[in-house]
Amino acid sequence: MPSTRDIRRRIVSVKKTAQITSAMEKVAQAKMARAQQAARAGRPYAELMNRVLAEVVTHAADFDHPFMKKRGGDKRALILVTTDKGMCGPINSNLLRKVSDEFVTDNTRVIAAGKKGAQHATRIGWDLAAEFSYSDTPVFAEARAIARLAAELFENAEVDHVDIAFTNFINTLTQKPEVQRLLPITEIKGVQTGVEGEEMSTELPGSTAEFLFEPSANGVLGELLPHYLNFQVYQILLEARASEFSSKMVAMKNATDNANDLIKDLTLEYNKMRQAAITNELLEITTAQMALGN
């Protein structure tokens, strides 16, 4: 049975843990807000791209591009977007379970964005084509590097299609593992910048202005598709980071609450033991006095 000193030491230790998890919760909250702000910052670019896409798709005739080439094979490149660190709840395990059960086969090449995905791929024995890292607030260059490798594998016919697996940010309490098809591009939709409670429609807007395309609408669309792919990957990286920090914030809040509950239980146990020790001392004193009196 632990002594009062042992319980007192454990209370001090749990209090320190609660302070750490509370600080981590506040840091995660601030980083999540920055990721959401970065998503909002890309909205003017997305709106302009959607306007141009609407005009280009309308004027392009018999358009053909390597990104739109369909193949009948089953070779896949999977961009696996996970976190670099742990202590962020179940989002990594949920995503890895989903892709393991439904998407990874012997013909799958994995492009890992995040250390957790790369470590899992190496441990399981998946075909790891490359590993990328990305910052807490992803920048466009990081997304472009990932998209470029995936596009090269597709254009060189090393894979027949490219998917991307990530944790979609629904709201602060909900994050959902999803897998989306990137290549081949079968339908050109409007790019979107999703943040909590705000989502742009994927429908291309109607024509509102006259555009003059040089050298041609087909040529402009050909140059625009790589940027379209890059921006899709960039937005998904922002979604994944927002999901990570949201999940970490919730996990750290739960850890802090559990630590505080444990402190209450330990304090109660400590007080009971201390009271029992005082009662025993009083009994001993009373017994001694009675013995001396007799």
Image (tube, rainbow, N blue to C red):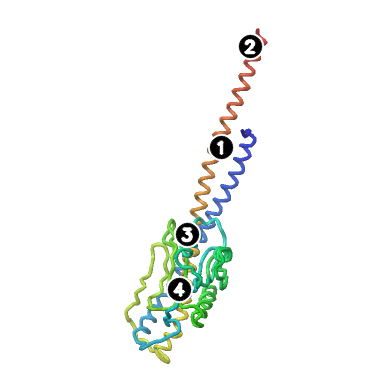
Q: Nearer the viewer, mark 4 or mark 3?
A: 3
Q: Nearer the viewer, mark 1 or mark 3?
A: 3
Residue 266 is marked as: 1
Q: Position of residue 183 (x, y in %)?
A: 44, 77
Answer with mark 1 or mark 3, whichever residue precedes in sequence: 3
Q: Which residue is mark 2?
A: 290
Residue 232 is marked as: 4
Callout 3: SS: helix
Q: Quadrant of the N terminus?
A: top right
Q: Nearer the viewer, residue 150 or 59?
A: 150
Answer with mark 1 or mark 4, whichever residue precedes in sequence: 4
Answer with mark 4 or mark 3, whichever residue precedes in sequence: 3
Outermost bottom residue = 215
Residue type, label 1: Leu
Q: Residues within 10 Å of mark 4 (few under 14, many from 20)?
A: some
Q: Nearer the viewer, residue 253 or 36?
A: 253
Outermost front residue = 106
Report, in whole angstroms, how far the alpha carbon at label 2 lies from the one at label 3. 69 Å
Q: Position of residue 89 (x, y in %)?
A: 50, 55
Callout 2: SS: helix
Residue 200 visible in rendering:
yes
Report, in whole angstroms, how far the alpha carbon at label 1 lies from the one at label 3. 34 Å
Residue type, label 2: Met
Q: Position of residue 135 (x, y in %)?
A: 56, 67
Callout 4: SS: helix
Q: Residues within 10 Å of mark 3 (few under 14, many from 20)?
A: some
Name the residue rendered at 55%, 55% in the picture: 87
Report, in whole angstroms, how far the alpha carbon at label 4 lies from the one at label 3. 22 Å
Callout 1: SS: helix
Residue type, label 4: Gln
